[in-house]
Each structure stands twice: as C-alpha cells, then as structure tokens.
Amino acid sequence: MKTKNVIQKIGIVIMIAMCVISCGDDDNFIAPSPVSTPDPELELKSKYVVGFQSLPTAGESPIDYVLELPSLESLTTGEISVEGKGIPQTGWRFFHQANNTVFTAGYSDDDTCIAYGLDAEGALEEKGNFAFQTTLDNYATIDENTLIAVELTYGGLADKRFHIINAQTGALEKIVEHPIDTDMGSGTPEDPGSTPWVTGMVFRDGKLFVSYHKWLADGSYVTPDVDRAYIAVFSYPAFELEKIIEDTRTSPIGVNGHSTGIEKIENGDIYSFSTSALSAGFTAATKPSGILRIKNGATEFDSKYFFDVESAANGGKLFWMDYIGNGKAIGRIILNDAIGPWGVFKEQGSFFKLVVLDLVNKTVTDVQGIPAHANRYTSTMYVEDGKAYLSSRVGEAIGLNGENADSGETHVYAVDPETAMATKGAKVQGYALKGIFKITN
C-alpha cells in the first residue's frame, strides 16, 4: 500500500513538473477550465396554472382563484378543486398569459391587475400589480417582454387607454391614450356618437391591428353600424393611427370578454371572426356570421377570401374562436340565437356546440364527445402536443333567481382537431376554468 502511494506521489510530481516546463515554453498557455456539474436545484421548473371560477355560496357572487396544478394529467383525470388551496382573488376576474407571467384583472369589484409567476424554486408567487380606471378586458402579447392591455369603455367619448406592461415583472410601464374611431356625434341624446369596445389585438411587422365594435356613447349598450367589420391599424411603438379598414360582408368583429377576435397564424395571415348574433350582445345584424382574412404583409381585408360560417354545412353563428395551429381553429356555435339579447352570457345552459373550423378549406366539423354546453368568458385555450384543453359546463340554464346554478357539471375536455373528437377529462368543482396556462421560472 505504501509503495503504491509513493508511486502515485511521484507521478503527480512529474505531471506538475511537465506543466511548469510547458508553461515556461508557451506564454500563451491557458489553464483548462474545470468541468462544471449542473446544479439540479437551479434547473428550470414548469407548472400548470389555471384561473378557477368557483360556484356561488349563500347567495354571494362566485370568487375567482389562481390555482397551480402539478401536471398535465391533472387536467385529464380526477377533480380540480380550490378547497384548502389556491390563491383567492377579489371578485370576478379576467385572465391572460404573457411569456411566463399570468395576469389577472379585476372586474367591477376590484381595480387591480396582479401578475403571478414562479420563483427560483418553482413556487407560485405574486410578481407585481398595478391599478387601472376601468377593467382590462383585452390583451396582446407583443414580444417576450411586452404585454398591451386596453380598458373597456361603457359610454362616453374618451380616448382608449392602452397599458404597456412588462411581461417579465408584471409592472405597468406607461399608459398611452389614443382615439380609435372618429364617430363623435354631437353629444346630444339624438346624436350621442359611439364608443369603441376593443375585441382583439394582434401585432405584426411593426403594426398593431385592433378589432372593435361600437356602442352608443350614451351607455345604452346599443350597437350602431352593425353590418360591417372594422379594424384600426396603428404603428407600434409610435402608436399612430394609420387607418381604419372596413368590410361590409359581415358584422363587427369579436365578442365582449374575449381576447380572440383576431388571430395571427403561422404564415403571418390574420383571421377575424364576426358573430352577428343578438344573443352575443349585439343589436341584430343582417350580415352573416363569418371569418375575414388580412394576408401577410397587407393592411387591408382580403377581398378574395370570406368564410361564411353561418351558411356552411354544420355552421351557424360563431360565439368564440381560438386558433389551434395548422390552419385550424376551435369554435363555439350558438345553437339558438332567438334566446334573446345577451342570452348566452350565463355560466350554465345548453347554448353552444363545439366545432373545428378549417380556415383554409372553409369547413365546419362538429366535435364529437362533448354535449351542448355553456362557457361565458374564455381566455385563450391551452394547446399542447396538438390538443386543445378547455372547460365547458353542462346543465340546465340558470333561472332568474339562481335556480339550477349548482345542478350542472364542469369538465375539462381535450380536443383533437384532426379527428374532431373531445375526451372528457377532470371534473371541475366550480363554474369554469377561465384560463389554462403553463409557466416556467
């Protein structure tokens, strides 16, 4: 044993000596860097986070939560509940994701937007918050560092307030106030003018495309000019209004409470949907519910493209559409528009069927495996490995005095757009998952 140690020590001395000689011969010698071993504690961690809308209790309005889930499997099996967990929010909320931050903005009961992300250990934490005047109900992710959110306006002729938000920290960086539409009227009861309600925003090639519909500025919720679609085109970041583009083949774009009135697909084309539905909050329109396109590089509607969803086989009036990839979108078709004004804006009822929309081939395919359902407000759906995950509630419509409110069931459904099949997943012990997100620290 001693002999072996002596031999090892001699070998080490010889190696050191050779290194010294080599260093003396070569002034440019650079010692090799030590090989580092990754610290498993510093590896990136990902989590699934949902915006959870609870059921009302004792006559109180439902409360929303931010809830983290351990895995994708949590969406497909078992139950999702906030009992004893989750971060309760103030009142009813909107939810949106930008980069690895989830934003939740209050509505009516709260004027705060809160940003959540993961800390270095992968725990969910509040990253920042800021206050606003009226609720933020439409969002656009510009890049990994920037989110734009715009306040809704119920009446009046004030400029729209665009909030420029740091998508990494959740901090409000500035507010840009700018008019969108010039229909100012005279301010009289006979001619009140109109106020724009933003229904979608998409950024492409230094331009911000903003879809909107109008309400009379007197706060009456009446939609003037119902038989054409319009989009305001801004330069960004200068925020100069370059023009407003219009199309008379369909009605105003988008629906109150969704961020998906317009969408950009992989090749840069932008698609928009118009509902033309009285039950979706509009004054009745005579033009069909349909989809328009703005081709990549263009700033006008494509006159050669119109997808008349209402007249298509399996079609009808669209309430919501969200792009899933490869030229296809998932949509909700209103089953009975005669239900009356704002009739489908309830958390429970047999209002919609789910469909796959082939934007290129202009086809509508009914999704099998999911019954007629309700889903009042919808953040962008979650997509992983080509499947779309969304929640839907099945049950009789809620009565005027809250009848049937707790008799329905909400489940997550995984939708395969290639087969147009939905697989029922986890049961949600609440009204809805208002957003499904995956974030990484």
Image (cartoon, rainbow, N blue to C red):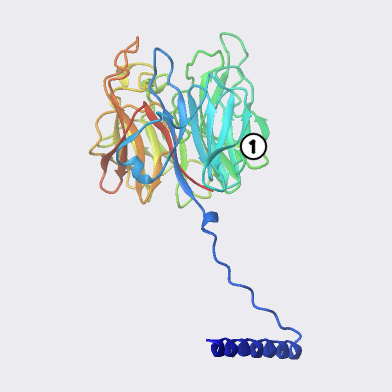
In terms of secondary structure, where does tag 1 sit? Answer: loop
- Disc count in the image? 1
**Which of the 4 image quarters holds residue 82?**
top left
Residue 226 in percent (x, y) is at 45, 23
Name which residue lies at 33% across and 26% down. 374
- Say few, some or many: other residues with alpha carbon within 10 Å of mark 1 (under 14 / 14 to 19 / 20 or more): some
Residue 227 in percent (x, y) is at 44, 26
Q: Three-letter amino acid code at disc 1?
A: Ala
Asked whether, in this view, residue 192 is left or right of residue 282, the answer is right
Name which residue lies at 55% across and 66% down. 37
**Which of the 4 image quarters holds residue 165?**
top right
Asked whether, in this view, residue 262 is left or right of residue 401, the answer is right
Q: Residue furthest front?
A: 2
Residue that carries the numbered disc 1 in the rendered image: 171
Residue 99 in percent (x, y) is at 54, 45
Name which residue lies at 51% across and 58% down. 40
Name which residue lies at 41% across and 39% down. 381
Q: Is residue 351 above or below residue 359?
A: above
Is residue 305 visible from the viewing direction of this image?
no
Q: Of 363 and 55, which appears nearest the observer?
A: 55
Is residue 126 visible from the viewing direction of this image?
yes
Residue 5 in percent (x, y) is at 57, 86
Q: Of 196 and 78, which appears nearest the observer?
A: 78
